[in-house]
């Protein structure tokens, strides 16, 4: 019976592996096609679009992107906005979630409910008010317009609070008996305890800001201040006939996001699984 059961489990695992492998191929094929086309000439892309591998390997597309456009300025802008916003959001989300979870005061539930209500506000409804506010502050066409308005993230606060709620009360009581300060409790107990949530939030926030096209489109005007998603559209319009350079630019944009996902994937998977268990 045990042999039959093990054989049945092996078949199930093999079927599951085959399905996952097929899904991986389907999801990765467009990225591989884009990367392959970045090493082809535009003529080869147009003449033989179905070939997955280049017949004549060339880096002319990358050379054109790096020398004929302010790519490094665009990359610097995107990295500045994304890294600063991600770090600040991790801090504000965790510390506000800590306060709302472990400190009881009169407006506690009201403030948390108000934060949740902001998540239900349609983005389109906030475009004009946000644009008018940015204009009156004198931040239009400046990188600062993409940084400061996103320092508080409602989803991040909600996620961190839910994880902090599940931390054992005994840990906090022991820390208080040892006369630990509030910040020490936050640094020594809360941050290590919600590491999976912070890993998931890092990926969601980084990818969301890195790939954001709409906000820079509204707040920025000059080419030198553009972030990569907006610059990609601008570059492809300026070099509409050069598909090799366009594919090269798209491939370069993928690198930072891929690195972040690889680094935080364990925390991301753990965070998602723990959220499902809750």
Image (tube, rainbow, N blue to C red):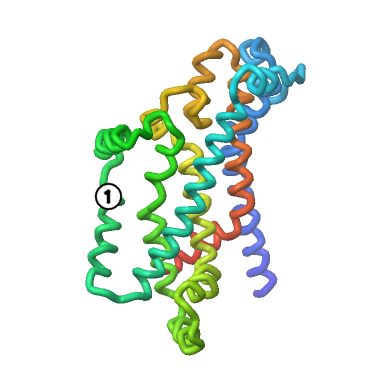
Q: Position of residue 239 (x, y in %)?
A: 56, 14
Left/right of residue 196 with respect to residue 3 in the rendered view: left
Residue 31 sits above or below residue 94 on the image? above
Residue located at (28% from left, 37% from top): 133
Residue located at (52% from left, 50% from top): 203
The N terminus lies in quadrant? bottom right
Left/right of residue 195 with respect to residue 50 in the rendered view: left
Residue linked to disc 1: 120
Residue located at (63% from left, 64% from top): 9
Residue located at (54% from left, 46% from top): 83
- Mark 1 crowd level (few <14, some 14–19, many ≥20, 10 Å Cα): few
Q: Position of residue 109 (x, y in %)?
A: 25, 68
Left/right of residue 80 with respect to residue 212 in the rendered view: right
Extreme residue in the right direction: 56
Instruction: In this rendered view, identify the residue nearer to me: 13 or 141.
Output: 141
Residue 23 sits above or below residue 95 on the image? above
The C terminus lies in quadrant? bottom left
Query: Count of labels shown?
Result: 1
Instruction: In this rendered view, identify the residue nearer to me: 144 or 213.
Output: 144
Residue 146 sits above or below residue 171 on the image? above
Residue 270 sits above or below residue 58 on the image? below
């Amino acid at each position: 019976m045990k042999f039959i059961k093990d054989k049945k489990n092996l078949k199930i695992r093999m079927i599951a592996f085959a399905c996952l492998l097929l899904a991986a191929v389907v999801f990765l094929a467009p990225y591989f096609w884009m990367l392959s086309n970045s090493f082809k000439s535009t003529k080869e892309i147009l003449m033989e679009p179905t070939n997955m591998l280049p017949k004549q390997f060339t880096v002319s597309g990358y050379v054109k992107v790096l020398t004929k456009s302010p790519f490094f300025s665009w990359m610097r802008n995107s990295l500045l906005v994304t890294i600063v916003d991600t770090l600040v959001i991790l801090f504000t989300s965790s510390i506000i979630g800590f306060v709302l979870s472990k400190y009881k005061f009169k407006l506690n539930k009201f403030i948390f409910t108000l934060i949740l209500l902001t998540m239900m506000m349609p983005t389109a409804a906030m475009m004009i008010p946000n644009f008018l506010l940015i204009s009156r502050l004198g931040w239009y066409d400046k990188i600062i317009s993409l940084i400061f308005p996103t320092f508080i993230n409602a989803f991040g606060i909600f996620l961190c609070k839910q994880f902090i709620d599940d931390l054992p009360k005994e840990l906090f009581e022991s820390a208080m008996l040892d006369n630990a300060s509030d910040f020490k409790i936050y640094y020594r107990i809360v941050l290590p305890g919600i590491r999976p949530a912070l890993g998931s939030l890092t990926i969601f926030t980084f990818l969301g800001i890195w790939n954001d096209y709409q906000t820079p489109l509204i707040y920025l005007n000059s080419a030198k201040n553009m972030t990569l998603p907006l610059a990609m559209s601008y570059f492809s319009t300026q070099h509409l006939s050069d598909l090799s350079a366009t594919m090269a630019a798209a491939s370069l944009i993928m690198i930072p996001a891929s690195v972040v996902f690889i680094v935080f994937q364990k925390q991301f998977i753990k965070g998602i699984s723990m959220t499902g268990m809750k």
